[in-house]
Image (cartoon, helix red, strand yellow):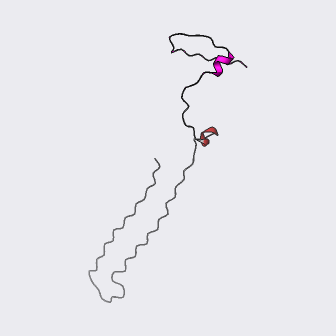
């Protein structure tokens, strides 16, 4: 197997033999965590569940005999949301 190394940003270019190539040092190798060497699947499933229960009981006027003009007003609200960013 033949590998060609081309360094184009030098003012002088020169073909190197195997011994000269072994003497080449330098460069930059970024830190690579171990997990980056394995296949990473970028697909994921994030399921979310909201379970809500609301019981509203209005017992205005129970056990009242001969009551007149009993008014009752009940307003109930319930909200929920799931967000994935």
Q: Which part of the image, by quadrant, shows the N terminus?
A: top right
Magenta region's main secondary structure?
A: loop
- For the point 37% across and 64% down, which residue is it? 77
The structure residue drawn at horizontal position 36% and vertical position 67%, both measured from the top left corner, is 76
**Relative vertical location of residue 37 with respect to residue 65 in this rendering, above or below:** above
Q: Is residue 8 left or right of residue 63?
A: right
In the displayed orientation, state which residue is furthest to the left: 69
Q: Position of residue 81 (x, y in %)?
A: 43, 56
Query: Residue placed at 40% from the left, 60% from the top?
Result: 79
Give the quarter of the image for residue 75: bottom left
Vertical side of 61 occupied by 9: above or below: above
Quadrant of res 65: bottom left
Above or below for 42 versus 51:
above
Q: Nearer the viewer, residue 40 or 28?
A: 28
Could you say where residue 71 lies in the image, as x and y percent from the top left?
A: 28, 77
Magenta stretch: includes residue 23: yes
In this rendering, is residue 27 above or below 49?
above
Residue 2 location (% of width, % of height)? 70, 18
Check residue 25 for magenta coloring.
yes
Q: Which residues are magenta?
A: 1-28
73, 40: nearer the viewer: 40
Front residue of 73 and 69: 73
């Amino acid at each position: 197997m033949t590998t060609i190394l081309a360094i184009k940003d030098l003012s002088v270019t020169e073909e190197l033999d195997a011994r000269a190539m072994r003497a080449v040092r330098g460069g930059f190798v970024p830190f690579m965590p171990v997990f980056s060497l394995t296949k990473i699947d970028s697909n994921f499933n994030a399921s979310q569940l909201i379970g809500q229960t609301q019981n509203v009981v209005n017992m205005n006027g129970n056990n009242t005999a001969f009551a007149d003009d009993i008014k009752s007003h009940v307003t109930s609200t319930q909200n929920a949301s799931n967000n994935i960013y």
